[in-house]
Image (tube, rainbow, N blue to C red):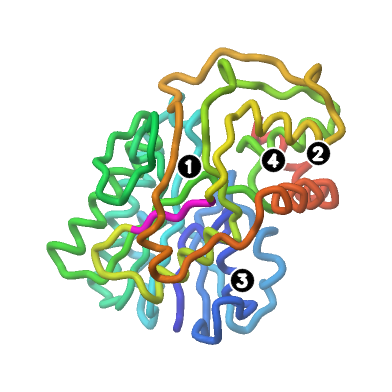
Amino acid sequence: MHLLVTGGAGFIGSNYVRRALAGEYGEGVTAVTVLDKLTYAGNLANLAPVADSSRFRFVQGDIGDAQLLRRVLPGVDAVVNFAAESHVDRSIGSAGEFVTTNVVGTQVLLQAALEAGVPRFVHVSTDEVYGSIDSGSWTEEWPLEPNSPYAAAKGGADLLVRAYARTHGMNVSITRCSNNYGPYQFPEKVIPLFVTTLMRGGSVPLYGDGLNIRDWLHVDDHCRGIHLVLEQGQPGEVYNIGGGRELTNRQLTGLLLDACGADWGRVRNVADRKGHDRRYSLDDSKLRALGYRPQVAFEQGLADTVAWYRENTDWWQPLVAVAA
């Protein structure tokens, strides 16, 4: 199976590519082409471990470039679409590029895949499209109620994917994940931001009262779930992928302080984010029925992640100024 992985130089996409080419999802993946625009969060260093593989090819470009897609898509057996602008704070300050990439770009990619006759398409989305939930957990049937421009743009993309499945009969599935963490994550996101800041002796920001709740999912488990959906997911269906470990931001901060040998004197309270969702929680029983189970225990995954940033300063130090 020849995969086109869009956004494959980013945090999650590159993890998927590395593991697919390492044979961790079986022997079915024969070749991987990565298409990535290489915006600030795309990094060829993320793909260095597989760059010399004869089964790997990199193409720099935009999923919104229909002409490029007509050259890249022939011979592809499946598209896995990770390409997206993904940082909530950046979307609050400037929403236009989020709509351009996440909505328009996804539509152009869908249309190109349809015209090329690509047999399979998996669109990677987020739990943030559901909004915020005070109690219980979202199933895939929950209405989309996004609260940030980022989440709204991802929700718009999801609806386009659904429309192409229903209108054109495309074999398309959607995955919606909880908060990811792990190595190679760009240091604007909370875990690598806190870890790299604490390692440099700085102070870290805690939004509001710190009681917003997120469910944490190791990137390895997320990518295993995505590949399971690629292989067994049904056309037009949505699959939640959860980690099963809910923490308040304050609890997470405490764990990161401990892991970095710091105390609460290194934390500064800041005004809450506009429209800050209070709690995310996914019911992923639909995917579990296909055999999905998170394999990375949060405590071990977090320890390994902190150790990776400690041991790979050459990777993240050039990115700190960009993330600020």
Q: What element carries label 1?
A: loop
* Residue labelled with disc 2: 259
Query: Which secondary structure type mostly characterizes the magenta part of the structure?
Result: strand
For image coordinates 45% across by 26% down, the residue present is 278
* Residue labelled with disc 3: 19
Q: How far apart are the two marked residues, 1 and 4, measured between alpha carbons?
A: 15 Å
**Badge 1: how crowded within 10 Å, few (<14), some, or many (20+)?**
some
For image coordinates 66% across by 55% down, the residue present is 297
Circle 3: residue type: Arg
Q: How far apart are the two marked residues, 3 and 1, measured between alpha carbons?
A: 22 Å
Q: How far apart are the two marked residues, 2 and 4, measured between alpha carbons?
A: 12 Å
Give the mark nearer the N terminus: 3 vs 1: 3
For image coordinates 84% across by 32% down, the residue present is 200
For image coordinates 39% across by 29% down, the residue present is 134
Give the mark nearer the N terminus: 2 vs 4: 4
How far across and down, in percent of the image, does residue 239 sit? 36, 58
Q: How far apart are the two marked residues, 2 and 3, measured between alpha carbons?
A: 27 Å
* Residue labelled with disc 4: 192
294 or 221: nearer the viewer: 294
